[in-house]
Amino acid sequence: MTHLLNLYSDQLNIKGINNTDKLNQIINIDREKIIYAFNELHYKTTNDVINDFFSSTPETIIDIMEEISHPYLYHIGMEINCPLEIALYGFKQQVDYFNQQLDDKLEITRVLIFPASQAFQHRVNAYTEVMRIWITMSHGEYMLELFDIHRPIAIPELIINHAKEIRDDIWHYAFYIEHANQVKQLHQYCQALTQKNSHYLLPFDAVINNKHDGSVLTKIINLQKKLEIEFVTGTFVTGPIPSSSFCNLS
């Protein structure tokens, strides 16, 4: 642990992590968040999330579902507290632990690290890197999207929120959309929705075109439920498109 603290001292100092106890705390929290995300990916469907998210405006559900052709979540995105290299190292070291917790056998198949879009960095007011990890499990291939935001971490608050199962501010459920024009249409649809319903919020004024990974996306937040969803499309670097065998819901 001391070796990691010294090796990544510059990145950890930005977060206020200056001893092994603090480093160990955030590593454990990250690990438990990842296990929770795996379970969400495994058991939640597109229909589950969309119906929950838009439950206060049920007339919108059919309109949204018509644009999503895949029945399963595309990925889950979240803030990771460790520098990405430490997170990936810990992930590889803890595969056996994850397998025990999930009663499965997982394998990392691909990893992609790139800068977050300028719009996202403006949103969080800090430089941010993203790491996508694709994992094969018995039911298919899953993807996690981890955001390393270079800003101080309030560890006492983090521990309290984690104990209460309060997810971070950028935790989101992503749905794969076939074409960029559909993402733009969804963005316009959601813009109109926010004008009629104050509990919905768009974090971005326009559709995001991230030059680093070729993705085209938009997001909407339900302030009442503290939920955020993403509609995304793009090139192959955005990962595998979910198939009908993506997971077993039985």
Image: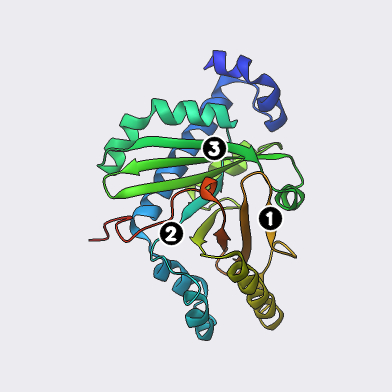
Q: Which residue is mark 3?
A: 112
Alpha carbon distance from label 3 to label 2: 19 Å
Label 3 vs label 2, nearer the camera: 3
Q: Please state the horizontal and vertical placement of residue 152, each as a whole percent of the image.
A: 70, 36
**The residue under label 3 is which amino acid type?**
Leu
Comes first in the chain, label 3 or label 2: 2
Q: Position of residue 233 (x, y in %)?
A: 56, 59
Please indicate whether residue 85 sits to the left or right of residue 49 in the image. Answer: right
Toward the viewer: 14 or 59?
59
Q: Residues within 10 Å of mark 3 (few under 14, many from 20)?
A: some
Q: Is residue 222 visible?
A: no
Mark 3 or mark 1, which has the lower sequence index? 3
Q: Classify mark 2: residues with Cα within 10 Å, few (<14), some (14-19) or many (20+).
A: many
In front: 117, or 199? 117
Q: Position of residue 174 (x, y in %)?
A: 51, 58
Q: Residues within 10 Å of mark 1 (few under 14, many from 20)?
A: some
Q: Residue at x 70, y 48 (%)?
A: 117
Q: Is residue 132 visible?
A: yes
Identified at 29% across, 57% down, the residue is 245
**Amino acid type at image mark 2:** Leu
Q: Residue at x 73, y 39 (%)?
A: 127
Could you tell me how many numbered marks the image carries? 3
Q: CA distance from mark 1 to mark 2?
A: 21 Å
Asked if labels 1 and 3 touch by Cβ distance under 8 angstroms, the answer is: no
Does residue 174 appear left or right of residue 205 in this picture?
A: left
Circles 3 and 2 in contact, beta carbons < 8 Å: no
> Which amino acid type is marked by label 1?
Asn
Residue that appears at 48% across and 48% down: 239
First along the sequence among labels 1 and 2: 2
Q: Which mark is residue 73?
A: 2
- Assign a secondary structure to mark 2: loop
- Can you tell which mark lies on residue 209? 1
